[in-house]
Image (cartoon, coloured by chain):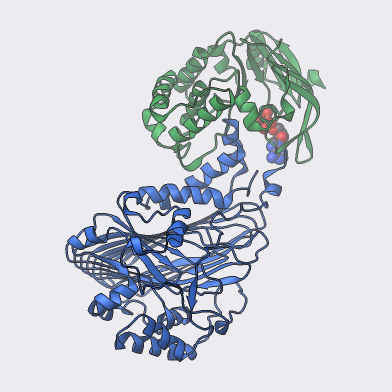
Amino acid sequence: MPSSDETIQSALQDYKYGWVTEIEQEYAPKGLNEDIVRMISAKKNEPEFMLEWRLRAYRHWLKMNAPQWPYFEYGPIDYQNQYYYAAPKSDKPKPKSLDEVDPEILATYEKLGIPLKEQEVLAGVAVDAVFDSVSVGTTYKAKLAELGIIFCSFSEAVENHPELVQKYLGTVVPYTDNFFATLNSAVFSDGSFVYIPKGVRCPMELSTYFRINAADTGQFERTLIVADEGAYVSYLEGCTAPKRSGNQLHAAVVELVALKDATIKYSTVQNWYPGDKDGNGGIYNFVTKRGKCLENAKISWTQVETGSAITWKYPSCILQGDNSVGEFYSVAVTNNHQKADTGTKMVHIGKNTSSTIVSKGISAGVGQNVYRGLVQINKKAGNARNYTQCDSMLMGDKCGAHTFPYIDVRNNSAHVEHEATTSKIGEDQIFYCQQRGLSEEDAVNLIVNGFCKEVFRELPMEFAVEAQKLLSISLEGSVG
Amino acid sequence: MSLLEIKNLCASIEGKQILKGVNLTVNPGEVHAIMGPNGSGKSTLSQVLAGNEAYEVTSGEIIFEGKNLLEMAPDERACEGIFMAFQYPVEIPGVGNTYFLKTAYNAVRKYRGLEEVDAVEFIKIMKEKAKLVELDDKLLKRNVNEGFSGGEKKRNEIFQMAVLDPRLAILDETDSGLDVDALRTVAGGVNKLRDEKRAIVCITHYQRILNYLEPDIVHILADGRIVRTGGSELAHEVEEKGYAWLEQGAA
Ligand SMILES: Nc1ncnc2c1ncn2[C@@H]1O[C@H](COP(=O)(O)OP(=O)(O)O)[C@@H](O)[C@H]1O
Ligand SMILES: [Mg+2]
């Protein structure tokens, strides 16, 4: 029998979602300049304010440099050698209902396990599917509309609810925010938009599946979720991308606005293509996600990150209103050559604000996992509380885990607690399970799932099951 | 045919020779006690039987029901019917005791060609076995050994033994860390699990658990060898005189 240590290095199983859909795509010419920005805006019949906003972002971006502070190096990205717009080519200008959607696209989603036909949709889940840059279909729209809930593609929101978009766009992540967010602001092609009216509790999980299909396409989607006073919504984002030898950039922006007494729960299950065993190809997932809480509001981020060659993101909460609550629950898995630099920022501005951070990093192969987090308690944030727990699990001895917690407290009534552990997956734990009859593989799954339990239990039920499966797929062959 | 036959077993850990030629035969229905001073190799023997890869078997044979045990992975041995109650049971954070044991139970059943049982069925089995060692129901809902007291961990081991129904149970110092009352219940539980098909090897430093278990055969392990084998009178002798006289005899 080989020891677990030497076998820990073996391969990640073949990426299950790595096929390409053969449909005709319409591209903007490669490269980036003002004309491309204007073209994207024109393609979408955007009002003047949108074009202006994009152009301001683009001009600002030209003055910026790509950040140098991440823990990992990544190859230089040639921004002029990418397509910034790709859409399924179709005679009809835009699908009005699911019946009009290209059957090839529907088949693609079915392969992904996301049937768009309403009767087949997982009970209680509404799906807005984004195929490359265009939203292809939204289910359950009618039912949601009865409650005044708006759940549509970003483009449709710009067209049909420009006043809402104008009011909230960029209020959490301004177009000047950071290199990748600014780029996104200039060229974002689509994404999802959600508005929950005052006092409405959204009766179902809202879900978006993004899929990068076209080669050499950066995907820049933008999501904006607004929960008006006293509203509640739970939103799930999942993603897959085809296998390609090169790296693809995914620079998304997600903005959440939780008005007074509102709650937004945002869950992500990310399994973008991680690259092959030797570290070739895979997605660069450089994403800006941030939410703003007004009085008594709550934003809860839950993420399970198993894919991408490099993951670089910090879903954050600006706790502006008094008594507001921010939460961040994260599982990040890196196997083979994957790298993840992820964490959160909790910025306490209001009084009696509280935040919870639970981060679980799992590294296998030669994977590297970084937790980077900021807890900032501002001067006027009396009685602010934070609890942070960062646990890292190492499988084998060629991977790494690193923790960079930044704590910035400017009000001395604050309570800030930080706990961190790093452990190797215990040979003694594996042996104990095996002695009771479990195979080594099952033992590892059991132990890893136990390690992640505090995060998984934050996920909606159906997705918690998915996340567990995904985790065992990602770690398959890492032991045994 | 004997259930277990150990022939001239030598084993080392981190290059250090611990077992230096152990011979032992265990028949179905028998209860053996293995006594010996600290560091004599008692835990090493049980870990080697269970297949812990941290230990290297340098020579010798272990035959279990006619099969070569040394060729089997630890989970295969467990499924074949070897159970070890750990001297230091391991905590598995975040994994529920019930879920853990159900997974193990079904893995063993599957190996033996039996239908797997569902949660409802399993809970029935579990409740019944928990009574055997008076295991608090609350512990079934907790995570595996997490935050258990020393005594609760030992009780949990015997409870697992009751559920998994092994052919050979090796109890590694199950008595240590138990107060008198707990010892009586746990030993009582083990006694209820005695039958003519199952064998029990009870490893202990002290004689007191043997008052309850009444072993058929007592062995003294010293410096990696079995230096004396006898009836229960041997355990009483050790209790009176300590181990020193036996170790001298071995030299
Ligand atoms: N991991 C280890 N590394 C080095 N020596 C060990 C290790 N485990 C046990 N030993 C040594 O092996 C010997 C036998 O230990 P053990 O089998 O645990 O004895 P017992 O159970 O009879 O008290 C002791 O001298 C102990 O120090
Ligand atoms: Mg011992």
Corner quadrant of residue B142? top left
Q: Nearer the viewer, residue A164 or B69?
A: A164
The residue shown at (58%, 8%) is B196
Q: Is residue A281 above or below residue B219?
A: below
Q: Quadrant of residue B18 in the image?
A: top right
On the image, which quarter does residue A16 sit in? bottom right
> Where does the N terminus of chain A fall, quadrant-wise?
top right
Rendered colour, chain A:
blue
Residue B21 visible (yes or no): no
Q: Residue at 36% x, 81% y: name it.
A: A174
Q: How many marks are shown on the rendered structure?
A: 0
Across and down, in percent, residue A91 comes to 40, 73
Tell me, yes or no, if residue A373 can be seen here: yes
Look at the picture and state if B128 lies above or below A144: above
Q: How far across and down, in percent of the image, does residue A402 sit?
A: 56, 63
Is residue A162 rendered to the left or right of residue A360? left
Residue sitting at x 65%, y 32% = B74
Residue B83: image x %, image y %? Answer: 59, 25
Q: Residue B63 in the image: x percent, y percent? A: 73, 20
Q: Nearer the viewer, residue A121 or A309?
A: A121
In the depicted view, which residue is nearer to us: A1 or B137?
Answer: A1
Q: Colour of chain B?
A: green
Above or below residue B139? Residue A297 is below
Query: Relative to A8, is B12 on the left or the right?
Result: right
Instruction: State the quadrant of the C terminus of chain A.
Output: top right
Left or right for B94, reference B229: left
Camera-side residue of A294 and A421:
A294
Quarter of the rendered structure image containing ligand 1:
top right
Which residue is at the far front?
A91
Position of A332 with respect to A43 (left or right) is right
